[in-house]
Amino acid sequence: MSVRPIRFYGDPVLREKSLPVGEVTPDVRRLAEDLIDTMVAAAGLGLAAPQIGETLRLFAVDLSAVGQDNILDRTGSLTDMQNRRIVLINPEIVFQEGEQNGEEGCLSFPDLYDRVTRPQIVRVTALDVDGQVVEIEGSGLLARALAHETDHLDGILFIDRMSSFRLRFIQGRLRKLRKNTEEEMRGD
């Protein structure tokens, strides 16, 4: 429906714990469409509602960006087979296994990428935009995306998953990004 501004590091909404969606209403469906439109416009792999200022438990993932081999299993009407983008409402990680360490970024941290350890396999249950229960299990990049976006809903950012050594290395960039975000929020 529309592309919304993405919230950057320093915006307090990114640290808030999101509220469960009580019912899949037309407003929730519009928010889901906005998540997809914003994710696509930003060329992102995933986008959580807090990243566009909404503290509700839902996120979008672009399955075409993760590759078919990373989708291990899915149930329910998860995908629009034409564009392969999904929205998961009230997602819950019900299984995770293994470990992978790889490069990760986030739309709320422009041009910042670093190594983060995530599970190798992740299974999530959720509701789709029709309010039906769905489940998706992925490995590799999809597992990383599912874990990353679920973290957003709990106010956890990918920098929280970085090693303390790597975090110290990027502190200057984080301070600058936070300062720019705070100035923009004040209208400076």
Image: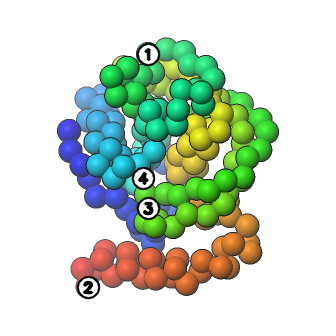
For residue 108, the mark is: 3
Distance between the Cα atoms at labels 2 and 3?
20 Å
> Could you tell which of marks 3 and 1 lies nearer the N-terminus?
1
Distance between the Cα atoms at labels 4 and 2?
23 Å
Q: Is residue 26 visible?
A: yes
Q: What residue type is labelled 3?
A: Ser
> Could you tell which of marks 4 and 2 lies nearer the N-terminus?
4
Residue identifier under label 4: 50
Which residue sits at x=66%, y=33%? Answer: 139
Q: What residue type is labelled 2?
A: Asp
Query: Which secondary structure, mark 3?
Result: loop
Residue identifier under label 2: 188
Query: Which secondary structure, mark 4?
Result: helix
Q: How is the image coloured?
A: rainbow
Residue 129: where, in percent of width, then height?
Answer: 37, 25
Residue identifier under label 1: 77
Which residue sits at x=77%, y=44%? Answer: 99
For residue 69, the mark is: none
Which residue sits at x=60%, y=30%? Answer: 70
